[in-house]
Image (spheres, helix red, strand yellow):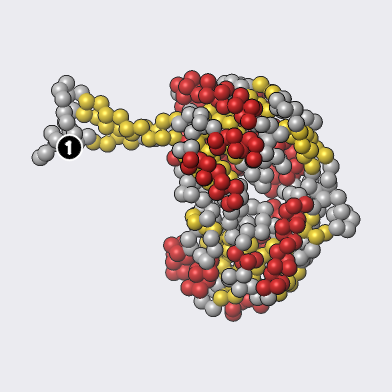
Amino acid sequence: MRLANYINGKWQENIAANYATVVNPATGEELSQVPLSTEIDVELAVKAAKAAQKKWAKVPAPKRADYLYEIGRLMKQKKEQLAQVLTKEMGKVIEEARGEVQEGIDMAYYMAGEGRRLFGETTPSELADKFAMSVRSPIGVVGLITPWNFPVAIATWKSFPAIVAGNTFLWKPATETPMMAYEMAKIFDEVKLPEGVANIVFGSGSEVGTAMVEHQDISVISFTGSTETGRKVAEAGGRNLKKVSLEMGGKNAVIVMEDANLELAVEGILWSAFGTAGQRCTACSRVIVHKDVKEDLQNRLLEKMKTLTIGDGLDESVKVGPVINQKAIEKIHSYISIGQEEGATLLVGGEILTHAPYDKGNYYAPTLFTDVAPDMRIAQEEIFGPVVSIIEVASFEEAIEVNNSVIYGLSSSIYTTDVNRVFKAQRDLDTGIVYINAGTTGAEIHLPFGGTKGTGNGHRDSGVAALDVFTEWKSIYVDYSGKLQRAQIDNEI
Ligand code: UN1
């Protein structure tokens, strides 16, 4: 199947007629051909988005929201089919794929609700007979750049608030996972979203992404991906005076204190570390454990890891699917020797699975390192695979310090039964998301999603906070005194 760009409500072949092959990471099977578009395709899409935007902004927000209700309804109707496509192109296990589609459905309904809120503020004026208010206004054409690990959910976190706020968008999905975007385009088409509101251009970051961040008619770039690329986006965005919202890496930890319920902690660690084969930016890749329970926790983890069945995510009994491609395999594997050279002990895993039935896909064995020091590279750098480092600490204070010692700040978690520690931890863990007695993954769509430090640049996806990215405040003063009133001058008491 050959995918086409979706521009101005029509399917359009990319001008250069250039394509790459999309492959199922579980089987190596060729799935589709993704367009490798160029600047010219971006130009066409931005033109369409710009032409549509003024009209779209005038559609009352509750009516814009009606399209989102319809989109949510269709996504729900097609949930199983979408989940199958998602597992095939991305590799995550089918149960998680269903969960991701559900995240998109939830976002549709949640943002549709915003159509009847989009709250502004009224404020007293300092002058008599004068009315002051501020309203959220649309920004214009927005650019969305999304990653392969959550090809549908993250796109909905960005596109749905953009739509309800009255913007039009150009979305560049990851070239590894274009089929979910194609499915979403079909849904946009089916609900008859007005032409030019939603535009999708497939292609590489260096071609399409660069053309987007450099384009003068795109006012906002919302990006999720690697820190390396995010930095480039921020630089170009800064030069072009765009609002740039970045959501990048993580090096998330689960802290396990000596008073924790260990059984619960083990379940939380397994789910957040090896779910999605560790390819979530929220994935747990460090376990910071109190020395009194280290042995016990380690043994329980090793025991439970034996139950992790690895394979094609379409098989309902599989718990860990493949990783996205060979490049990812190589990166993950390179950290094994890095860890060993630094003096960490490899407890289990550390191997690329090449024997049947794994020989056709990209499979990596769930891996556990112990005796890891907080400053080792395996404890500092994002590996983005099923690799966990166990770090021993002697106190609660040390655990917090180690958690905060990385450049990233997305998600953190602590298992403890001490209520004082719970409240101290939620205050002192320096990440954008904190879990108490739960793993590091599983953020819900109606709360802000994002991180501090090297994870982001102060913006948030999802939740009502997403509206801050896709709207601008407009302050409106209505003077009904019928005379000249001068602020700051005529307001003395
Ligand atoms: C991501 O990994 O980029 O909180 C997003 C979670 C999911 C989203 C992860 N709801 O794990």
Q: Residue at x 43, y 62 (%)?
A: 427
Work out whether 411 lies above or below 483. below
Q: Residue at x 48, y 42 (%)?
A: 238
Q: Residue at x 54, y 32 (%)?
A: 215
| Residue 212: percent from left, percent from top | 57, 34
Work out whether 486 lies above or below 351. above
Determine the residue located farthest toward the front in the rendered image: 239
Between residue 17 and residue 291, name the one nearer to us.
17
In the shown orientation, is residue 329 left or right of residue 170?
Answer: right
Work out whether 57 lies above or below 315. above
| Residue 312: percent from left, percent from top | 80, 49
Determine the residue located farthest toward the left in the rendered image: 493
Is residue 7 at least partly visible in the picture?
yes
SS of the residue under disc 1: loop
Between residue 19 and residue 109, name the one nearer to us.
19
Q: Residue at x 78, y 47 (%)?
A: 25
Q: Amino acid at mark 1?
A: Gln
Is disc 1's CB within 8 Å of ligand 1? no
In the shown orientation, is residue 176 left or right of residue 68?
Answer: right
The residue indicated by pointer 1 is 488
Work out whether 279 lies above or below 120. below
| Residue 354: percent from left, percent from top | 85, 58
| Residue 90: percent from left, percent from top | 73, 45
